[in-house]
Image: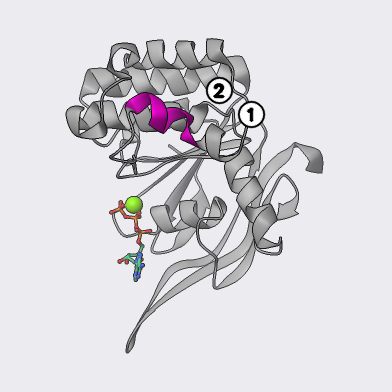
Amino acid sequence: MENDIILKCESVVKLYRQGENSIYALRDVNLEVKRGQFVMICGKSGSGKSTLLNMLSGFDTPTSGRVFIDGVDINDAPEKERCRIRNEKIGFVFQNYNLLPILTAFENIIAPMQIGKRQWSEAYFRQICDRLGITDRLNHLPAELSGGECQRVAVARSLIGQPSVLFADEPTGNLDRKSSDELIELLKMTNREFGQTIVMVTHDESLLSIADTVYRMTDGTAKNITGNL
Ligand SMILES: Nc1ncnc2c1ncn2[C@@H]1O[C@H](COP(=O)(O)OP(=O)(O)OP(=O)(O)O)[C@@H](O)[C@H]1O
Ligand SMILES: [Mg+2]
């Protein structure tokens, strides 16, 4: 059912121009994500994974092609509407966390709620922080946290507003095996218990089996390889 499609992109192309050189980071990418799905995107370094996530989440604009979130063409929407969609419907865990250095962990986590003047669930907040093991780190600044703790704060920030789609770019990249397993367990829990839709980039092939759908990126193209792992 079309209604069940929370995220869709059609013929998305991204061309980066640098003087004489042009790089097609994405060439005609098409994909569909159903509500409640856990989708993983794998592929070699430079294959276009982060670029695709930036297009799907509305952080950047494709050279051509269309992206729909909850049925709305995000590149067609007026700037104010795009901001609202980004704040309310999108959660994003960046490859390099993007925490604000002058805010504590707690303030970083709730920042999107304050910016969007939104309510959040105190119980969900506590549950997420407990599961991520950051409850006793909430009053610290990012500079006082380890890389893995910063990553987990960024994950809490992306989940707190229960977005329509959570995007995560290599969220386990800076974590040791144990923290990585715990983070994946948390993402699985939010997916199963709260129906959180997730689109995650990973280079860890051992994680692919827990996804409902897997895409492999090769030189700017995305192929659905679910079932051929
Ligand atoms: N802002 C930019 N300007 C020019 N070229 C870019 C830009 N961002 C990315 N690229 C190029 O586009 C291609 C895809 O980059 P992208 O960051 O999407 O790869 P990736 O699959 O996420 O790689 P990694 O696994 O290393 O994070 C690469 O060739 C990269 O050099
Ligand atoms: Mg990347």
- 204 w.r.t. 191: above or below: below
Say which element carries label 1: loop
- Residue 93, by quadrant, is top left
Q: Position of residue 24 (x, y in %)?
A: 42, 73
* Front in this rendered view, residue 91 or 43: 91
Residue at horizontal 40%, vertical 29%?
107
Q: Which mark is residue 36?
A: 1
Q: Position of residue 79 (x, y in %)?
A: 65, 61
- 159 w.r.t. 75: above or below: above
**Label 1 lies in ligand 2 vicinity (Cβ under 8 Å):** no
Q: Position of residue 71 (x, y in %)?
A: 75, 49
Report the predominant secondary structure element of the magenta stretch.
helix
- 204 w.r.t. 138: above or below: below
Residue at horizontal 63%, vertical 29%?
36
For marks 1 and 2, give the CA distance.
7 Å
* Front in this rendered view, residue 114 or 58: 114
Q: Is residue 182 left or right of residue 83?
A: left
Q: Is residue 109 magenta?
A: yes
Q: Which mark is residue 191?
A: 2
* Amino acid tagged 1: Gly
Q: Position of residue 108 (x, y in %)?
A: 39, 32
* Amino acid tagged 2: Asn
Q: Which mark is residue 195?
A: none
* Ligand 1 quadrant in view: bottom left
Q: Which contiguous range is marked in magenta?
A: 105-111
Mark closer to the chain start, 1 or 2: 1
- 41 w.r.t. 105: above or below: below
